[in-house]
Image (cartoon, rainbow, N blue to C red):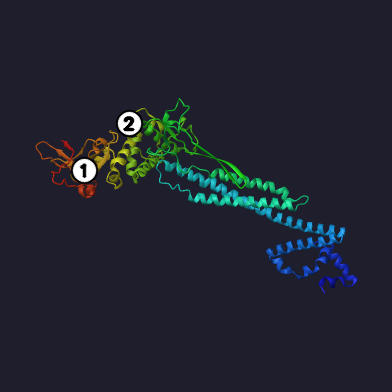
Amino acid sequence: MTQWEKLRQLPAVYRQQLHELYDRDALPMDVRHYLSAWIEKQEWQRAARDHDLAMVLFQVLLENLDIQHSRFVQEESFLLQHNIRRYKQNFQVCLNVTSTLTIKPHLNKLLDRAEELIDLLVKKELVEWQRRQQKACIGAPDNVCLDHLEKWFTCMAVCLFQVREFLSKLDELVGKVSYDNDPIKAQKPALQRRADTLLKDLLKSSFVVETQPSMPQGKGSLVLRTNVQFSVKTRSISLSVTEELHVINFDTVFDLKGLSVELQASSLPVVIISNSSQQQSAWASVLWFNMLSLDTKDVKFFANCPAATWPQFGEVLSWQFLSATKRGLNDDQLEMIALRLFGKQRDYDNCKVAWSKFSKENSPDTFWVWFDGILVMVKTYLEQLWRDGLIMGFVSKGKEKSLLKKKQRGTFLLRFSESVIGGITFSWVEYDMIGEPSIKTVQPFTKVDLNQIPFHEIIRNFQILESDNIPENPLLYLYPNTPKDEAFGKYYSDKTGGKYIKTKLMFVSKE
C-alpha cells in the first residue's frame, strides 16, 4: 500500500489537515494522487542537494503529466485534462521564474565584469601598446609584440559570444514555454543589446595596424614614395611637402554567428615624398610627430606643433643610434648635444627645442641635417667601432682639450665634426720642449675618404710629415690610455699580396 493510499484512509479529523496542506498549491492534490506511485519512489532528499538530479526529476514529472493528460483524453475527462495541463504549465512557469531570477543578476554581473575588462584592455593596454608602437617606429627599443593582447582580446570575445548564444537559447525556451509578464521577454532585449554593444566595441578596438607602412629600402617606416598606390590630390599651401601628414585607413566587415560589425583601423600618419632628396626632412617630421603627439590621427599637427623638452628630445636622439647600431648615446654625449643646442646651462631639463630649430629652418646646417649626417656615416662606415665604444663622437672642442691635455703624448680620441656634415676626425696631444701640451686635429674625414679606406686603417697608418723629420704616426693611445693596436687590432686586415709587392693607401698630413 502506498503512502498516499494510507493518507486517504485517515480518520476525517486528519483528512481535514491533509486538505489544508494541499490547498497551498505547492503540489496540487490531483498531481499527488495520480502520480503517487512515481513520487514515492524518488529520492527527494538527495534531489534537494543535487541540482542536476532535481532537474532530471523535474523533466520526468512533466513527462508523467503528459502521460496522464493523454489518459484523460482517451477517457474524455475534459475537466481533468484541463487541470493536468494547467498544473504542467504552472510547474514550467515556476521553473522559468526561478531560473530568470537567478540568471538575470548573474548575467548582469558577468557583463559588468566584461565591461571593466574591456575598459582595461581598450583604454589602458591597447593605448599603451599603440604608444609603444609609435615610439618603436622612431627607434625606441619597446616591445610591440601583440601576442598577449591578442590572447586577452580573443578570450573576452569568446566569452561575449557565449553570452549571445545563451541569450539565443533563452529565446528558444520562450518560444516553447511562455506566460503573461514573463520576465525573460521583458529583460532579454536589454541584456542582448548590452552584450552586443560590448562585443562590437571590443571587435572595433581589436582591429589594429600591426606593421606600419614603409618603403622597402627607406630610412624607416611612415615615409612613402609616391607611385601607383599612393598619390596626393590636395595640398596645404602653408605646409611643406614633408610636413603634410596622411593617414591610410583599412576597412573590413566582421561577420560571425549573426553578428556583423564594420571595422576600421588607421595607420600612424605617414609622410609621402616624391623624391629621395626629401627623405631626410620627411623622417624628421615622423620623429617629431611620434615623439610629441598622442593623437595618432592629428594630420594637422604641424600647423601648430609644440616644442620638445630636452629629456624627450635627448631620448629620441639616443633611440636613433640604438636602432641603427645597437648602441645608444651616453650622458656625456647627450650633454655635448645639449650644449650645441642651448649653450652652457646649469640644468638642461627645462630647456625646449622648437620644431623650427630642429629641422624647419631654411639652412643647410640645421640640427637634424648635422645629426642625421653623422648617423648615416656611423651606420654605413663605423658601426662596429661605434658599437664597441671606441668613438667618443659627440664631444666639443673645449671638452676635447680639457680631456687630452692631462694625458701622455700620443693620446687621441675620435669625435664627430661640428662643422662638416657627416665628418669624423681625431685629435691628439703633443708636448713642446718645455712640456706645454698642444692639441692637434686632423681635417675631418667624410664618406669620400671612408669609401676608399676603412677608418680603422686610416688610424693605423696615418702619418704626419714634419719638415726635416721622418713621417711618423702620432696616434699612440686611444683615450684614456689604451694602446692603439690593442684597441683597433682586431679590425686590421693583413692580407698578403702573393708574389706581388704589397701596397697600401694611407693619409699623410703636413705639419
Compared to residue 482, the image places residue 359 above or below, namely: above
- Classify residue 457 as left or right of residue 470: right
Query: Residue 430 appears in which quarter of the rendering?
Result: top left
Q: Amino acid at mark 1?
A: Glu
Task: Tell me which corner region of the image, top left, top right, bottom left or bottom right, holds residue 500.
Answer: top left
Which image quadrant: the N terminus? bottom right
Residue 79 visible at all: yes
Residue 22 sits above or below residue 328 on the image: below
Locate residue 52: give its quadrant.
bottom right
Q: Is residue 481 visible?
A: no
Amino acid carrying mark 2 in the image: Asp
Residue 386 percent across, percent down from the top left: 29, 44
Query: In the image shown, does 176 or 262 lie closer to the viewer?
Result: 176
Judge whether 388 appears above or below 240 on screen. Answer: below
| Residue placed under numbered mark 2 in the picture | 365
- Mark 1 closeness class: few <14, some 14–19, many ≥20 residues within 10 Å: some
Give the class, few, some or many, for how many residues have Cα within 10 Å of label 2's Cα (few <14, many ≥20).
some
Residue 291 in percent (x, y) is at: 43, 39
Q: Please tell me which residue is depicted at 30% across the width and 44% down the height of the picture.
A: 383
| Residue found at x 77% / y 59% | 91
Q: Nearer the viewer, residue 340 or 120?
A: 120
Residue named by callout 1: 457
